[in-house]
Image (tube, rainbow, N blue to C red):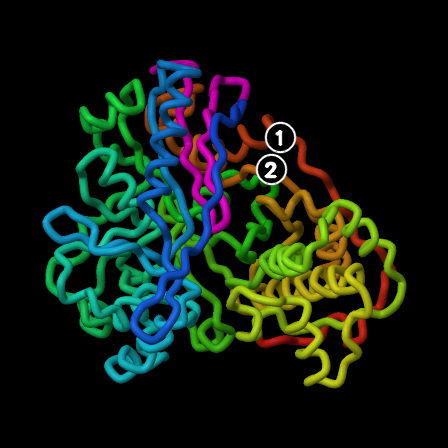
Amino acid sequence: MTNSGTVAAVDLGATSGRVILGHVDTTGVRMEHVARFPNGPVTLHEHDREALHWDVVELYRQVTEGLRRAFTAHPAIASIGIDSWAVDYGLLRGGRLLGLPSHYRDARHEQGVAPVHERLDATALYARNGLQHLPFNTLFQFAADPSLRLAQRALLVPDLLGYWLTGVEAAERTNASTTGVLNATTRGWDPALRAAAGLPSGLLPTLRDPGDRLGPLLPAVADAVGGTAPVTLVGSHDTASAVVAVPATDPEFAYISSGTWSLVGVELDAPVLSDAAREANCTNEGGVDGRVRFLKNVSGLWLLSESVRTWERGGDAVDLEALLAAAAAVTAPVPVFNVADDVFTAPGDMPARIAAWCGDHGLAAPASRAETVRSILESLATAYADTLDTIRSITGKDIRQVHIVGGGSQNRLLCQLTADRTGLPVLAGPVEATALGNVLVQARAVGLGGLGGASLEALRAMVARSVDPVRYSPRSAHTTPQSPPRRRMSV
């Protein structure tokens, strides 16, 4: 067993990607960024509509360039792990990609909901897959995909990149659990769900678990990146990796993985498939070591980033830190809106949509950019609090603290408002939780830092030794929004 060493984490988000070196020894983990690159939807004209896709070929180019930099900086990399966002996939025939993968925000996916529900209604679906209803869940994408009949294999995004690196086809289980085709109880592909999605025989690859070795780099890939290392499967759904890196010392915790989306939930040993869970639209997703991430998908900082993009498209430079400071100084009541309303899903003019929503619901719209930002963050914090109340009532879990990890942990106002709304202490950080969880699962698999065979709790203890979360305590009083601060929302 090796006491120390270095692994490379490829961490792909919906707006950017990173390649990060994780240096692991018995004292903790040190992260070293070697590459960062943009990622986002590509709009293509298809017949009579504009369609959103991922340029996954360019993404692969950026990943291999990042790995080249990683091997240049540290030639003795012990392992490579890949995580990304969920649900989206590429189709292969004869090992070749059949077009660019669709983006989960593409409107076409909604066409797959009715055909699936004709075969299995919402109650029957939930009893099998335990997933929150989202129109872009992979089984709905499959049902709406005209290219499916041409394909021999479907690979989720991190599995597709792993295939290009190693030549090995596999489906990592935590990400497979987001598709809606995996049975929440057996944790295997479900024949009835496959049939409901209209999947051809053999389309889905063999399931593998975090910590499994996928395979060595192909010789041509090793030549291109200037080194070689095995690819190790991690919690390839980015939230699964992020939850590994929650620095929890109290087992009664909730987490918010905060970025483009907010994943608000708790960790359980078994799925909850009750009518109450289904009616609340909670989801049961796979975690590392067979844990269950019982959570809800709540909108996230997408609302803020789209607002900033709108203002910048108008020709204004936006200083986000100054804007957040101005939002923190707002004392006038601001509207709380339903962040889960479908009107906020697609890219576009978010401030105008927020104003229109407020008008439609009898609320005064924000009067300035600072009020718009405050309204977004108050609305997110309210949704977080309501979601945790729902989860607590369904699971009976005694939540004593909330960990916010990911990019949103840097947003001081959001963290404080979350503490205020939930009435619970909030511990913010680490920012790079997803990459850190990715690194730790690899390190355990290859025996770095004395982690060989370590429990999930031991991995979290190492995170707690390596990072210093910022603590936010609930305040007894804060700015009152236009709507009741704990109004129940259908989020």
Q: Measuring 27% from the left and 36% from the top, which residue is drawn there?
A: 212
Name the chief secondary structure element in magenta.
strand
Rendered residue at 76%/70% (across/down) = 485
* Residue 160: in magenta span: no
Q: Is residue 451 above or below residue 154?
A: above
Q: Is there a contact, CB below 8 Å, between mark 2 and mark 1?
A: yes
Tell me which amino acid carries mark 2: Pro
Q: Which mark is residue 467?
A: 1
The quarter of the image holding the N terminus is top left
Asked whether, in this view, residue 304 is left or right of residue 288, the answer is right
Residue under the image location 48 percent in, 72 percent down: 281
Magenta-highlighted residues: 1-29
In the picture, residue 301 is in which quadrant? bottom right
Is 279 on the left-hand or right-hand side of 138? right
Q: Residue 65 location in percent, x, y?
A: 37, 29
Mark 2 lies on residue: 430
Q: Is tag 2's residue or tag 1's residue first in the polypeptide sequence?
A: 2
Badge 2 marks a residue whose secondary structure is loop
Residue 398 in view (yes/no): no
